[in-house]
Every structure is written in structure tokens, then in C-alpha cells.
Image: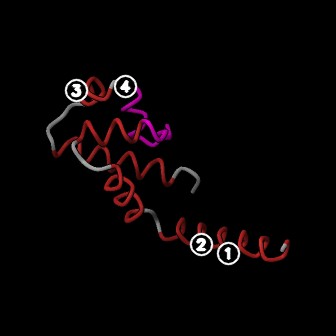
Amino acid sequence: MNNAPSSTFGLVVREIREELGLSQEALAMHAGLDRTFISLLERGRRQPSLSTILYLSFSLGVPPCLLISKVQERLPEAFMDHLQQTRSKAAGKVRDSA
């Protein structure tokens, strides 16, 4: 479950890249990243930094918020439930300490 966001981000990047007819190498060159890193991202083996998300979105011609919203739409329901539970626990701790 921990790699759900990374794997999903990679799928989104791959889908957009392929729709544009770009190779991993072409995307990497345009974004100033290594082709191997693009491959690792697309396979969910690496997590992107904020800078990487910005470089990729510019290179793919999409707003960064589109990349993130597409990831959020596709995350497994179990992962979203986990996020909600974590948020609820954190809110409870804040209330308890006040």
C-alpha cells in the first residue's frame, strides 16, 4: 500500500507521455532528467520531488495540478481510506493537546 501513490503517479506520467508520442528518453531530455529515472518513476520505484513534478508537467505540457488530480482520482479506495483515518487520528491528537 505504501507505494500506491508512486505507482499511480508513474502510470499517469506514462499515459500522458505515450499519448504525446514521446519516448522516455525524449521526456527525460526535455525535463532535464535521466532516462533511467523516468523509467523508475513510471514503474513506481521512485517518488518524485516537487521540482520533478514541475519539470515533468512543463515537459508534458500539462499543469502540475492535473498530474496530482489524476493520481488522486486513481488511487485505490483502500489507500484513500487509510489517509482519512490518519487525518482523523491527527485531528484527535490536536484536540486532546489543546
**Which amino acid, by three-letter code, is at mark 1?**
Ser
Highlighted magenta segment, given as a residue range:
35-51
Dot 3 or dot 2: first in sequence order is: 3
Return the disc, 1 or 4, that comes first in the chain's sequence: 4
The residue at 34%/59% (across/down) is 70
* In the depicted structure, whether residue 50 falls above or below residue 76: above
Q: Is residue 21 left or right of residue 8?
A: left
Q: State the mark number for residue 84.
A: 2
Q: Secondary structure at mark 2?
A: helix
Q: Which mark is residue 88?
A: 1
The reply to whether dot 2 and dot 1 touch (C-beta < 8 Å) is: yes
Q: Which residue is mark 4?
A: 33
Question: Element at badge 1?
Answer: helix
Residue 21, horizontal then vertical, whole percent: 14, 38
Q: Earlier in the sequence, mark 1 or mark 3?
A: 3
Residue placed furthest toward the left: 21
SS state under label 4: loop
- Front-most of 84 and 74? 84
What percent of the width, then of the height, locates residue 28?
Answer: 30, 27
